[in-house]
Amino acid sequence: MRDPGDKTNKTVLSLFSGCGGMDLGLEGDFKVHKKCVNPNIHSPLKRDGSSFVHLPRTSFKIVFANDILREAKAAYVPFFTKRGAGHEFLDESIVNLVKKAERDEFRFPHADVVIGGFPCQDFSVAGKRLGLNSHKSHTGVIDPSAPSEENRGKLYIWMKKVIEIVKPKMFIAENVKGLISLGDAKKIMESDFRGIDKGYVVLNARLLHAANYGVPQTRERVIFFGFNKKYLSKIIIDKLESEIIDPYPPKTHYLPGEKREGLSQYVSLSDVLSDLEEPETSRDAAQRSYSKAKYYGRHVQGQIEVDLNFLGPTVRAEHHGNIEFRRLSAGHGGKYLDELNHGMKERRLTVRECARIQTFPDNYEFIRSANEMGREYTLSASNAYKIIGNAVPPLLGFNIAWRLQNIWDDIFGGKK
């Protein structure tokens, strides 16, 4: 594995970091189920004889993280501290940080890469879809009087401002699939990113299905890539714009109906959940924690029983009645009768099961009490569901990093 202190590391400044799904993915060095990786693409891998494999450390290193949610920081800091990370995490609005930087009251650290999954609630098909015209301010509070550029739907503009300040070699931006179908939102964002001072090659954003990268979930995300022309030769610019050089990660797994050559089969829920104990007998606080909301009927979102033989549903940043059921009772149409006959009760997915579906490793502790870490680090099941659902699956982030580090020198090696 690569030494995190190695000078060859590519430094990464993380915005809208959440609990660190993309951050963890870009750095690597975490465990996933062995079926989540494709040995034809991910090699070498560290195996220990169990059902899990250890992904290698990549050449990317997080040097700064930011998110306005205190519960995100409460989860992120203890986990990354255990990994030996020494970078700062600021739980402050990006709008405030940029304004401070413009007044020379704050300085963003230098970074080779800026990443950010700007807020997606206003673009999600599950929401009101106000998009760029959100009623909420950058702090998440409804405020129609807030300046238009500071509303939640335009926080990508503030990511753009950070890129203009830091001037990284490249940036990666992420958002929900709903962005594509919301008018010209995607084109407007691409145009705005292309307007960054000093100039970036901004590729047409691409929709990636997480299940094509070993994530056991029907989750799709729009990924934007931008490359600083200052570090690119004319030949490389042409190759990026013509897609001769494709920085997007190749698929590792196929879905039903897709071509299979060289790819592994999609990962099912049974693959990643079957070894977990029931909440009543588990020692893992995240596995013991789950929503106790009753069954409301199939006409209400989140009232389905998951299909263990297929992909999991998209893990949403919601809790209580919107978390799908691990199993339903026979009276509610449950199909896992053997489990019910063995006394296993109707229940929703646990926090740990949602984390497994998102490919977070089991050593990520999502449930913490005030007695354990101090009041600042208290995390409830509701907190955990929210930050897990908001996250980029770490394994998707790892595939992005794996591809980028393999072509990094091809892109940036010709011009210093």
Image (cartoon, rainbow, N blue to C red):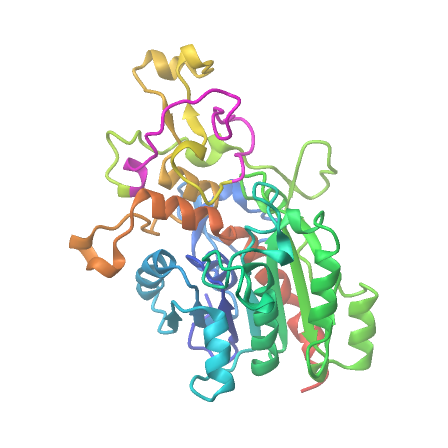
- Within the magenta stretch, is there residue 333? no
Name of the residue lying farthest toward the front: 145
Residue at (37% x, 17% y) in the render: 339
The residue range painted magenta reads 286-314
Tell me where residue 87 appears, x and y as whole percent.
38, 73
Q: Please, is residue 34 above or below residue 150 in the view?
A: above
Tell me where residue 177 appears, x and y as whole percent.
65, 47
- Between 328 and 9, the one lying in front of the other is 328
Residue at (43% x, 84% y) in the render: 106
Image quadrant occupied by the C terminus: bottom right
Residue at (38% x, 67% y) in the render: 91
- The answer to which image quadrant residue 66 occupies is bottom left
- Within the magenta stretch, is there residue 304? yes
Magenta part mainly helix, strand or loop?
loop
Position of residue 346 in the picture relative to residue 64 (left or right): left
Report the label total. 0
- Between 129 and 369, the one lying in front of the other is 129
Image quadrant occupied by the N terminus: bottom left
Answer yes or no: is residue 205 visible: no
Tell me where residue 387 appears, x and y as whole percent.
42, 51
Name of the residue lying farthest toward the left: 371
